[in-house]
Amino acid sequence: MSRVVADRELCIQAGNCVMVAGEVFDQDDDGIVEILREDVSGEDAEHAAEAVKLCPASALRLEDR
């Protein structure tokens, strides 16, 4: 299992995270990343890892639990 962490201060509202892992991420009314599910595993963890790679602001990370 992994824990999803987002630095909302770094987020530039690109939305890549929502496009590849909409079950884990969303955006608030200002377009800033929100975490829907902090603990992920399996396919959700794979999608979250892809979102981490695609984030242009490096605002996301996964931590092993």
Image: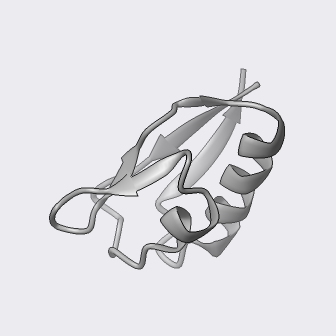
x 74%, y 42%: residue: 45
Residue located farthest toward the top when viewing the structure as drawn: 65
x 60%, y 49%: residue: 61
Is 14 located above or below residue 3 in the figure?
Answer: below
The color scheme shown is: one colour
Spot occupied by residue 63 in the image (x, y as percentages of width and height): 67, 35
Relative to 26, is 37 on the left or the right? Answer: right
Spot occupied by residue 29 in the image (x, y as percentages of width and height): 16, 62
Residue located farthest toward the front when viewing the structure as drawn: 23
x 66%, y 51%: residue: 48
Relative to 62, is 10 on the left or the right? Answer: left
Quadrant where the C terminus sits is top right
Residue 51: quadrant of the picture: bottom right
Spot occupied by residue 7 in the image (x, y as percentages of width and height): 38, 51
Spot occupied by residue 31 in the image (x, y as percentages of width and height): 25, 68
x 33%, y 74%: residue: 13
Residue 43: quadrant of the picture: top right
Quadrant where the N terminus sits is top right
The residue lying toward the viewer, choosing from 7 and 29, is 29
Is 52 located above or below residue 23 in the figure?
Answer: below
Q: How many marks?
A: 0
Relative to 63, is 14 on the left or the right? Answer: left
Is 40 located above or below residue 43 in the figure?
Answer: above
